[in-house]
Image (tube, rainbow, N blue to C red):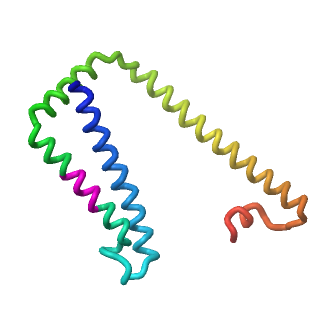
Amino acid sequence: MKAKKSLVLFLVSCLCLALTFCLGIAAEDTAETAEAANTILGMNLFNFISLCVLAAVLIAVIIVCIIKRKKVGEALRAYKSEMTKITWFPWKSVWRSSVFVIVAIVAIGLTIGLLDIAFLQAQNALTGNSVGWFSSLFGK
């Protein structure tokens, strides 16, 4: 039961963090495009209300953590003890796997990019367009 409560607390915190990130991006976009008369602190009304709800949830989580600090402490100690029971892979193995994944992602990205350029060139050749691949990709 203790693990469930700490998991719920962790998930709520992650949700708040994700919502903060999304609202930050939305606020930047809104500040650039919206008129000053329709905004509050550079955000439209929806984003402002969402930010207020996020702040209320975050404050509620902090207050609950302060009030129930003994139970939160117990949950964190239980989490820490469970983490020590895990058999971790050796660092060398983790490093090799990480490098392999990064190299694979870059290789797949380059392959998709080159195929995109090749298909674009084929399309331009078939349609008679004489636009270069860089110009047709980036609209310049």
Specify whether 30 is left or right of 118: left
Residue 10 lies, in percent from the top left, at 28, 38
Q: Nearer the viewer, residue 75 or 124?
A: 75
Q: Nearer the viewer, residue 124 or 42?
A: 42
Query: Eyeballing the image, is 64 above or below 41?
Result: above
Q: Is residue 62 left or right of residue 8?
A: left
**Picture layout, residue 9 above or below residue 84:** below
Left or right of residue 113: residue 16: left
Residue 104 lies in the magenta-colored region: no
Q: Quadrant of the C terminus?
A: bottom right
Residue occupying the point 78% across, 64% down: 132
Q: Quadrant of the N terminus?
A: top left
Q: Report if residue 56 lies within the magenta region.
A: yes
Q: Which region of the structure is painted magenta?
A: 52-59
Q: Position of residue 92 (x, y in %)?
A: 43, 22
Q: Main secondary structure of the magenta part?
A: helix
- Which residue is found at the position 25% from the left and 38% from the top? 9
Query: Which residue extends farthest bottom?
Result: 37
- Residue drawn at 58 percent across, 36 percent down: 103
Residue drawn at the location 28% of the way across and 22% of the way down: 83
Q: Is residue 19 above or below residue 93?
A: below
Residue 6, quarter of the rendered image: top left
Residue 48 placed where, x, y %?
A: 32, 67
| x and y, in percent, of residue 86 in the image | 32, 18
